[in-house]
Amino acid sequence: MSNTPRVLTVANQKGGVGKTTTAINLATALAAIGETVLLIDLDPQGNASTGLGVEMRARKQSAYDVLMGEASLAEAAVVTDVPRVSIIPATMDLLGAEITLATAKDRTYRLKSAIQKDGAAFSYILIDCPPSLNLLTINAMAAADGILVPLQCEFFALEGLSQLLKTVEQVRSSINPQLEIHGVVLTMFDPRNNLANQVIRDVRQFLGRKVFETVIPRNVRLSEAPSYGKPALLYDLKCTGSQAYLRLASEVIQRERSLLAAE
């Protein structure tokens, strides 16, 4: 791995698709296989910060301060209880970032600049986006090498995906020509649901090899873990959800190696 971190943005403009759960557990799984990971929480709700046990009073500086140029990555990063995982937490201040940055010429590149200045301490940077296609998400896409898209196994999944793909194309053409869809991960799969199986078939037919083999199941332990301030992999390593995220991390690393080999 070079001194330049690989930056992956976890994005879907639809809420409730397992985006933050994916970001937290993928970060933990990557760290478990030796990577040094920074998770940037760009969602004003701050669920990734809470899910990694970072309480409000510990969020002295946040992603908002980084975007405003008032803190570097190193200054804002909080070391978590997960070995080799740090997080830049979110606060409700992020709700005002779009208005504050609206007239700035470099408004879409604030996060990219911060990572270029100060990201070399990490081998992976994951960005957890808000559930909307706003300036925060555009900043994340501008900074990213690739986008990882969590997609819930439900009827409207493909409808939302097509809008996201259009946005990615717009960002590629105007802001970040290197941006790729790193992969789509199917989440919240219930094998008893015939519709869920149909969605998986449809998505694989539509996107082919872009879809990860690993499918994340609906799992009670995955849902419980954030309330304890822990990733599922620390809360219950043996549960089906944790095992699925370990397999996903392995797939992500394999794709990364293929991409780097092709460069």
Image (cartoon, rainbow, N blue to C red):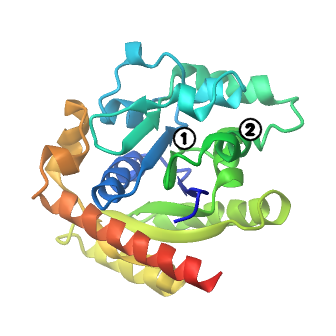
Whether residue 153 is visible: no
In the rendered image, the quadrant that contains the C terminus is bottom right
Comparing 154 with 180, the one in front is: 180
> In x, y percent, where is residue 202?
44, 81
Q: Amino acid at mark 1?
A: Pro
Towards the viewer: 166 or 237 = 237
Q: How many marks?
A: 2
Q: Is residue 103 above or below residue 153?
A: above
Question: Which residue is labeled 1 in the image?
Answer: 130
* Residue occupying the point 54% across, 44% down: 129
Task: Looking at the image, tell me whether mark 1 or mark 2 is earlier in sequence order.
Answer: 2
Residue density around tag 2, few if under 14, some if 14–19, many if 20 or more, within 10 Å: many
Q: Nearer the viewer, residue 143 or 147?
A: 143
Residue found 69% across the figure and 41% down from its top: 117
CA–CA distance between discs 1 and 2?
16 Å
Q: Is residue 66 above or below residue 131?
A: above
* Circles 1 and 2: CB atoms closer than 8 Å: no
- SS for callout 2: helix
Element marked by disc 1: loop
Quadrant in which residue 181 is drawn: bottom right
Circle 1 residues within 10 Å: few <14, some 14–19, many ≥20: many
Depth-wise, is mark 1 or mark 2 nearer the camera? 2
Picture coordinates of residue 133, whole percent (x, y): 65, 47
Give the residue pinned by disc 2.
Answer: 110
**Residue 109 higher or lower than 191, as above or below:** above
Query: Which amino acid is tagged 2?
Result: Arg
Q: x, y (%) of residue 207? A: 53, 81
Q: Say which mark, if any, is on residue 208.
A: none
Residue at x-position 80% and y-position 37%: 107
Instruction: Name which quarter of the figure residue 195 lies in.
Output: bottom left
Residue at 33% over, 58% down: 34
